[in-house]
Amino acid sequence: MLPYKNLILINTDTTEPLYRQIAVQLIALIQEGKLLPGTLLPSTRTLAFDLQLHRKTITAAYDVLVSEDWVDNLPRKGYVVSSDLPLIKPRSYKKNKISAFAHKGVISFEPLDTILNPVFPLDKSRIMIDDGFPDVSLLPVTTIAKQFKKALDNVTYKAILRHGMWENSNLSVALSTFLKQTRGLDIGVENIFITRGAQMAIYIAASLIIKPGDKVIVSDPSYFIADLVFERLGAELIRVPVDSEGMCTQSIEEILQKNEVKMMYIIPHHHHPTTVTMSVERRQHMLKLIKAYDIAVIEDDYDYDFQFKYDPYLPLASGDHGGKIIYIGSLTKVLGTPFRLGYMVATTDFLDAARKLRRLIDIRGDAIIEEAAAGLINNGDLTRHIQRSNRLYAQRCDMASELISKELTDVVNFTKPTGGMALWLTFNPEFKLYDILKKAHKDGIVLSGTVYCTGKNAHLNSCRFGFASLNEKQLIEVIEVLKKASEK
Amino acid sequence: MLPYKNLILINTDTTEPLYRQIAVQLIALIQEGKLLPGTLLPSTRTLAFDLQLHRKTITAAYDVLVSEDWVDNLPRKGYVVSSDLPLIKPRSYKKNKISAFAHKGVISFEPLDTILNPVFPLDKSRIMIDDGFPDVSLLPVTTIAKQFKKALDNVTYKAILRHGMWENSNLSVALSTFLKQTRGLDIGVENIFITRGAQMAIYIAASLIIKPGDKVIVSDPSYFIADLVFERLGAELIRVPVDSEGMCTQSIEEILQKNEVKMMYIIPHHHHPTTVTMSVERRQHMLKLIKAYDIAVIEDDYDYDFQFKYDPYLPLASGDHGGKIIYIGSLTKVLGTPFRLGYMVATTDFLDAARKLRRLIDIRGDAIIEEAAAGLINNGDLTRHIQRSNRLYAQRCDMASELISKELTDVVNFTKPTGGMALWLTFNPEFKLYDILKKAHKDGIVLSGTVYCTGKNAHLNSCRFGFASLNEKQLIEVIEVLKKASEK
């Protein structure tokens, strides 16, 4: 119920009758959209009491509203704002433009438009091919719900405030053990900072490091949302090509010799978007460069946990880098898109600054979700879920690779990855990816992930093909549609 | 298990025996902390297979490790890294400083140090007085858990990606109805953008608006974390005093006449930190100024839902402001600190830009939590929870106010608020708040919220006293301790 007492102001210094004053102000409330069609007005008795007026005055006001079609007097219900309203004035939020201050350059986000929006709309598709996301139907739903309930039951305000001031300390402890065991990182709990997904970790680390004009080395191509973060912070990006062994460290060395570089952003493991894993030789060269030059390094290791063969490489961050590597990972790739949990591993002074910046952005995380995630790690559910998923994703990777090799032989080039959740498909130049996707979209198939087929990226003619979230039937159907769409 | 096959490299071009090469590399792994005390090494058979060597070579290597005390050979268990290790080398992440790049000014967050950390440590207190947070023990835990489970059960990947690309559309719809009904905002679902708490909304809105050097009007005092956001973005803050009627709009008008102001940050309802609600006259003046001048306005309405009397004021955003007001609110204050959900209400073009920036910071929200919150709104649980909480908080406000008036008569000045979750206590100059808090801290009482008693804020000698999360017994105890601590 609206606060009519404050909304309707009675002026006794005027000759305008009271009932008319009330009617006019109620009409204004309707016109402004504060009283919506169908809203029941207060009874004449209630409003009379609130405004300290005689009930007959209110009745007279309501009569005006009824006679002017603003309000209906419904039997056994009362006075209700009409659903058939006379002319409505334009409203503050319903205009399309904040014309009043847009000309000051308030909204200057246009450059991001083309790449942050999907090439074709997602909403009318039968099947969506994503960027390489887990299959949420595999989630141990009951276990997660149980952990959530447990965390919620045991929540005390004090515990939340202490743990949750920035992040949940139980999750930090669980994660630090998990990362030591799986990645050989020589860290204590003090070297872990929990964020919303890896993206927030990238944003915060980059914000602390990059000043306008700083030079930043990235791969070519690179994870485009990271590129956008660095560019928004004013970085000048220096791009280094990626081949079958990963980023060309020889090029990096030449760049470092000639430039004062502030930061380097690398994805040695299942590089995004190309899925290439960096070779041992390049890794050793890279570590040597990091030690020799005065640079900060963000190592983005977004899907380390998904490897189909034994023998993953350890992250560069597990090597000897003098604390220069900020290692970033994600639980979102494990628990699925419903959850956004990531982490940053770095030296304590850097994390102190990161925690402070995070408070300006987001205060703290969701204590219950973080507690539930800690529970999933501690009782082994996370590891079991990863193992189960890996087995299935390996099969889907095999199947997708075989199908594409067979059905799209002359159309697509790709290298089957040793893990992860996506293929990187490069279409031969005579097959324009944009046209193929347009045809596929008509057939109900849409790509929601990284697609390079328009604008300055058109020459790449490539896309990520997330196989992990598609079942056998969907894989067959999707590739059939792509095949049909590639036929001349 | 670590990927030994990649970690141990065998060099056949050297005279160093194979077993020795293996032993040295395993020692290095232990020294680097990659093999932790207690870790079970692979059996000699497994490692021999992995490295394609004879099992005897591995046994010889393990013998070296045992003889040098790096490893214990435990009966019926195997070779285990000793918990009693010889000298450990310094580790990459365990150093205290990222000395390698800190001198480039990478970490420059010192100015925030003093105010972002609590004045006294929180961890050894019996009772914490917070900034004005809800009592999480009132949460309808079963209902929340049920909604969470329901959302998790029904989650499909496609639904998440569609709704969750930026935010959950069910929550946007539920929220827009809720806000129309409670706040008289004339909005559609397209005018709502869901964020992590109000803080992220403030951060994003300010980031889109403020360029270095821009002038921004804030109240004096103001919500200090918002101040820090604006300052970090390079704003020049112009401070306007707050009296018993709220921010002095007369001063604002004078400032606007003389300066090109880019933005104004206001908290008309339960102002933070002072709890003052802006009078009707000031509100009308404010709206006039907003219409007359070319400025963007952030209206922070963090605890509108908590009012102890009928007759709340509607937000300024419900008035005629030509789309200039960006209205920001929070569900965190309703659902409690375990959840971080906030929203921004603005014209669609501004929200488009906001959504893009949010992707750089955080990609998207937690789809399950957002879906659960939508369920809580739609089935009326949220409103019932607010009503129940309000009744209790009103009692606690009464009780806290009476106790403080009685026990701290000459010590503290405050005005009892008409809603919200905190009192704003100003200590008389002869009572140094810092000294009182120091004594109270020894007695197990600590303040975790806004405290102005050190540095450039020492003259304010004031603090927020969150009464909502303290029960009767705690209120009595806390005020007794504060009384004792104020005695000379």
Image (cartoon, coloured by chain):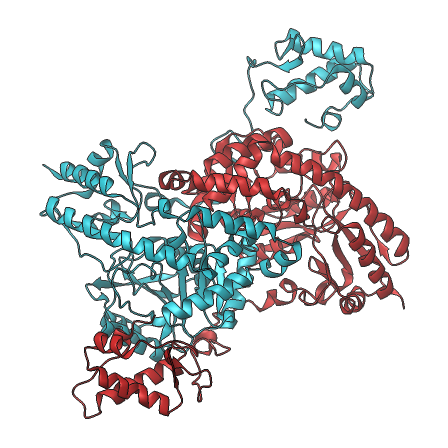
Chain colours: A cyan, B red
What residue sits 29% from the left and 65% below the top? A268
Q: Is the residue A48 above or below the residue A460 in the image?
A: above
Most foreground residue, A183 or B242: A183
Quick one: quadrant of the N terminus of chain A?
top right
Q: Residue B403: give x, y in percent of width and height.
A: 86, 51
What residue sits 38% from the left and 81% below the top? B75
Q: Residue A444: give x, y in percent of width and height.
A: 25, 33
Q: Quadrant of residue B333?
A: top right
Q: Can the viewer see residue B283 in this picture? A: yes
**How many labels sit on residues?**
0
Most foreground residue, B307 or A307: A307
Most foreground residue, A311 or A279: A311
Quick one: quadrant of the C terminus of chain A?
top left
- Left or right of B186? Residue A437 is left
Q: Residue B206: give x, y in percent of width and height.
A: 54, 49
Most foreground residue, B257 or B146: B146
- Left or right of A325? Residue B181 is right
What residue sits 56% from the left and 14% below the top? A85
Q: Quadrant of residue A231?
A: bottom left
Q: Residue B89: give x, y in percent of width and height.
A: 42, 85
